[in-house]
Image (cartoon, grey):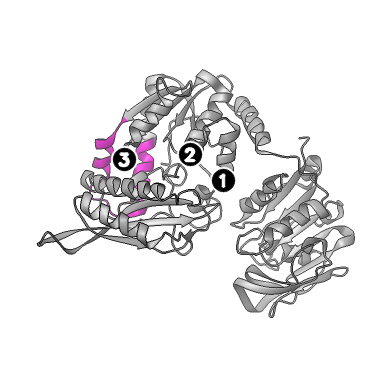
Amino acid sequence: MNQELIIVLDFGGQYNQLIARRVRECNVYAEVKPYTMALEEIEKLNPKGIIFTGGPNSVYDETSPHYDKKIFELGIPILGICYGSQLMAYTLGGEVKTAPVSEYGHTEITLDKSSALFSGVEEKTSVWMSHTDYIANAPTGFKITAHSSVCPVAAMEDASRKLYATQFHPEVMHTERGKEMISNFVYKVCGCKGDWTMDSFVETKIREIRETVGNGKVLCALSGGVDSSVAAVLMSKAVGKNLTCVFVDHGLLRKNEGDEVEAVFGEGGSYELNFIRVNAQERFYEKLAGVTEPEKKRKIIGEEFIRVFEEEAKKIGAVDFLVQGTIYPDVIESGLGKSAVIKSHHNVGGLPDCVDFKEIIEPLRMLFKDEVRKAGLELGLPEYLVNRQPFPGPGLGVRIVGEVTAEKVRIVQDADYIFRKELEKAGLTKGLGQYFAALSNMRSVGVMGDFRTYDYAVVLRSVNTSDFMTAECSNIPFEVLQICMNRIINEVKGVNRVMFDLTSKPPGTIELE
């Protein structure tokens, strides 16, 4: 590998890929590797720097993950974050204890501006803490470069050995100058030039796919959304006519979306793909009948997707690989690895235990949504397709609270269509991360035309986010919400109330289910 590389050594933290993403934002390539990776393997890769991630353990517990002390003797710059900072301190002779006062959330620290890590950062700045242990005493040779009111070593460094550590998380958006800190490490400490771009990822991934697939046949689960569309075109460039894209219309798509997807990818569309549309609406409705628990709905939809694909694969004959547009927030929320299950995405945690394919390929698995969009543009996808609204694989099945029926699908399709069109008309969509209408399971009394009604409440949701790991409610002008409310109640049969969801992520998720 000729390009500059930063290795992110994973000790079990949820933000491991987020750290890598922050480095890639600096135009330097980063890969997440397990802490079990041998020291010799790291030396072979010859990275410009190494970052130790956070993790849930205590370094003084013998069962916790540790690493060979010789890594600090390689002369390679190292940044330890949270658990990684404690591991650095503990391994090099410092003292780590249970903190008298745990720190969680926004914390003001006072830092040493002379540190290369904090170049250009204000002396007092707000960072994101999340720890119950702390560094009580820094190792010999280390200088304390930041502290908070209760954390004596919020950051430390041994500049002569290019070893740096922060108790806080510079990679998360909540740390005000975190991006600058990561950039300082990459450029000022590691000496990177920043010559990596997304086209490098695309070229590398195409080469990897060709090596994996060979002459095998590939089936791609194409939903028409951003992720699966980028995955499909990437696979098409890698394996050509050995790829067949199957679009399953499960009856849970947005209004008119099935026909729109077919117009883009089907016969006469913009791409030379083997495209098959499967209309399986009734099949999915039957499977979902009487099911109200959202996680169970996701599991059912996930399994049925796979079964449809297996059936289509048998018609095609001897398909070896299944391709999905899984991205990193899907992996984290589905609880794969060491994180807790938040919700099972149909293409990761929603998969059944047994699938009839040699291998599942997820070329975008380690990317965030905005990185997927960049990859799409590099692949030549049109901007309108790359920037279209994200849509969950289980579709409206997870935007309908309670049992899914054809009638409820019709209600949420119509309400969602009105909401999206009114936001577009008002010129508000460009800065929004995701916006949609969902159907609550609440029915209430209303009055329309002097008659009593007992109908459903629609919930409108709009959030601002860049990475879909966190999100804030969008500030939609009240007059626009009023227009949406009037149109939905007047035009969508079965609705007599419209509400707007103010919840951020966390504590909520972006979807409403």
Magenta-drawn segment? 279-305
Measured from the top left, where is residue 290 in percent x and y? Answer: 23, 50
Q: Quadrant of residue 46?
A: top right
Q: Amino acid at mark 2?
A: Val
Residue where numbered disc 1 is placed? 370
Above or below, comparing residue 258 to residue 401 in the picture: above
Q: Amino acid at mark 1?
A: Asp
Quarter in which the C terminus is drawn: bottom left
Q: Amino acid at mark 3?
A: Lys
- Depth check, front residue: 308 or 464: 464
Q: Quadrant of residue 122?
A: bottom right
Please tell me whether mark 2 or mark 3 is closer to you in this view: 3
- Residue at point 53% right, 25% down? 236
Q: Is residue 235 visible?
A: yes
Cα–Cα gap, marks 2 and 3: 17 Å
Residue placed farthest to the right in the image? 160
Residue where numbered disc 2 is placed? 226
Give the structural element (helix, strand or loop) at label 1.
Answer: helix
Q: Is residue 470 magenta?
A: no
**Horizontal placement of 157 versus 353: left or right?**
right
Q: Is residue 302 magenta?
A: yes
First in residue order: circle 2 vs circle 3: 2
